[in-house]
Amino acid sequence: MSTLSSSDSSDASAASSAASSRSRAPDIGRRWHATTFRLLSVYGLIFAVSVMLLLGFMSWVVTGEMERQNDLVMDWQLTYFGAIPRAELAQTIGHRLERERMHAAYYGLFRADGEHLAGDITRLPAGIPTDRKGVTLDHTLPVAGAQTAPVVRAMAVRRRDGDVLLVARDLTHIIRIRDTILNALLLSSGLCLAAGVAGGLALGMRQMRRVREIRRVTQLIAQGDLNQRLPVGGRDELDMLSHLVNHMLDEVERLMTEVKGACDGIAHDLRTPLAHVRSLLAHIDESARGASGDRQTHVWMPMLERARQETDQLLDRFRAMLRISEIGSLKRRGGFAEIHLDALVRDVCELYEPLAESRSISLGVEATAVQVVHGDRALLFEALSNLLDNALKFTPSGGAVCVKLAQMRDGPQVDVIDNGPGIPVEERHAVMQRFYRGEHTRHIAGSGLGLGIVSAVLRVHDFSARIGSAEPGTRVSVECWPHTLA
Amino acid sequence: MLKVLTIEDDEIAAGEIVNELSRRGFSVHWIDNGKEGMVCALSDDYDVITLDRMLPGMDGLSILTTMRSIGVTTPVLMLSALGDVDERVRGLRAGGDDYLTKPFDPEEMVARLEVLLRRRNAPMPQSEAVLNVGPIELDLVSRKVRRDGEEIALLPTEYRVLEYMMRHAGRTITRTMLFEAVWGYHFDPGTNLIDVHMGRLRRKLDPPGARAMIHTMRGSGYMFGEEQR
């Protein structure tokens, strides 16, 4: 009985698995969204980090190569200058500077104490190694005739006579080219990332739509519409799964139909001969009554009476079973209309008031006006009368039964409260199942199917019932609002 | 002798209907297929018809619809294994006068047939303002009930029960019929429930020592009247 679950403030274990699965249902969508977005952002992050690493590596390689090339050239230059005697060196540097007016290279000759001898480098930068090791000087090399100090690759050597010869090559242009290339790469990577995320999002949306559709269909199936099948449109993993589930549903439907057919058939076939037995008994009873009142009649009459009662009870059970199956197969929402529950509750109570009185049970009604619900009046009447019938049945003489109708946050709620023996916590879930009778109530007549009918009716309406404790006694709460998210 | 036409393809069910009705003095004509059944039903030769909903090669509903469309007003009791509310509504909309789900208690069927027959043979005048059965008088306008001229105060439900019983005085009324007619629902409310309602009405209507007007028919229902049949 999936629409029914037992719960109590003091008891969580009796809550049915159906109820807990239902409470999980609403956030599936949200979680799915979260999953998709988390995936996308992780994917984006990895992409961005990879691009950064790639660019860094490229920059490192390019810079290294650039420096190596310059160092090679400068090494040659130093070797060339090294071969020139000191007296001619200043002049040679002057010549070179004359020839190279494009400022691709700078030269400087200093005495051992740092005094400027020749060249356009006006001062020897501090800490520069003098053993032909290339260093990059970032805007720190003072150059004559330049507005700002350029970025250069420099190399110095201490000559045998103690002078320091410094050679530097301008890196400004080559750095600009490198940076332009790196920027272009960075920009295109950004575009790639954006395109990737957008594509992923679009694909994810499509999957989400499909999952949403699958969720909708699954809920319909869970509500008993076994004709529904999951949509299948292609050949991907979802479709494969859908195929499998659909196949499974075919089987389930076939088996359900077989079982239901067999059950209905049995109930139906047994009912007919039982009805015959019953009318036979009635005839025997009638003819026996007509006979003279000898001793035999006195012995038979009570037995006949018993036999009739038993067959009546059996017939009642079959009727209830078929009724449950009938309600279950009702086309959903066929006879639905707007219902005023307060009038309905009063009608049910009016119907049962004489029965309560005959058992010396006080029957109270508290029906406030509540919001109109959408439902089948006849079925709800039947369900409520079964609940009330049960309450009256299990309340001892002199007890009290109360029916309360109140507006809750989600919708109207009908409580049927008695002060009978109550239902033990561990039995609360089981009582909603067909034929279940509590340990202590086996002596009370009934089909054991009353609550089964209640469940069937509530399932058609998507309402729910909870069994709780009324300290002492039982409180059955019927929550008249939808319990699954369609 | 009242003539009943039974259109029913199930031999066992038909045998049961024929037996029960013959035992009670009806003359029963049994037809086991839809075509012949249609011909007989259209002849307007019978007082009442029991019609199975599912016949080989023909839906019982189409016989009913045809009958009503050419103006045959013979009362029809639909018998069907299809018990759900939708089917009942469809049967009654098509022109059926009552609907009984198989398998049924033969006494229930007879009780319902008798009500249909009475409705046909002695139609209740709409203008009737007072119902009189023995010492009981029920005023339909002022909704007052008197026994031997003495007013009896009844609750609305009790009044409706009494009205229904007085309209069908002398006939067996089953609990199901009463529940359907007075409360308008089609499920089984349990024997006890109707009995306590009847008990209340009886206490008010039949004071101790006076002649009982409400009789319990063992195993089937109640009867209203001065004499038990």
Image (cartoon, coloured by chain):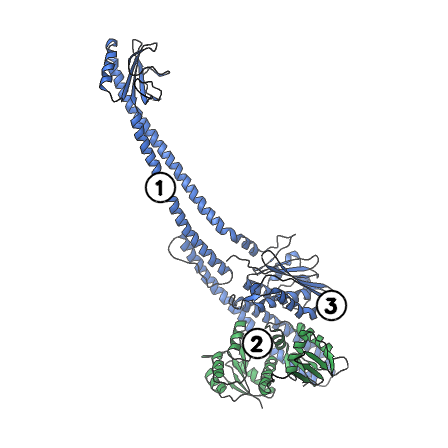
Chain colours: A blue, B green
Q: Residue B96 at what x, y percent from top left?
A: 53, 80
The amino acid at mark 2 is: Thr
> In this view of the protein, can residue B90 be seen by the observer?
yes
User: Which of disc 2 and disc 3 is earlier in sequence?
Assistant: 2
Drawn side of residue A279 relative to residue B65, left or right: right
Mark identifier at residue A161: none
Q: Residue B146 at what x, y percent from top left?
A: 72, 81
For mark 1, does the 10 Å Cα neighbourhood hold few (<14), some (14 to 19), or many (20 or more) residues? Answer: some
Above or below: residue B3 compared with residue A435: below
What secondary structure is marked by label 1? helix
User: Which of disc 1 and disc 3 is earlier in sequence?
Assistant: 1
Q: Residue A98 at what x, y percent from top left?
A: 23, 17
For mark 3, does the 10 Å Cα neighbourhood hold few (<14), some (14 to 19), or many (20 or more) residues? Answer: some
User: Which of disc 1 and disc 2 is earlier in sequence?
Assistant: 1
For mark 2, does the 10 Å Cα neighbourhood hold few (<14), some (14 to 19), or many (20 or more) residues? Answer: some
What secondary structure is marked by label 3? loop
Chain under numbered label 2:
A
The amino acid at mark 1 is: Cys
For discs 2 and 1, the disc positioned in front in the rendered view:
1
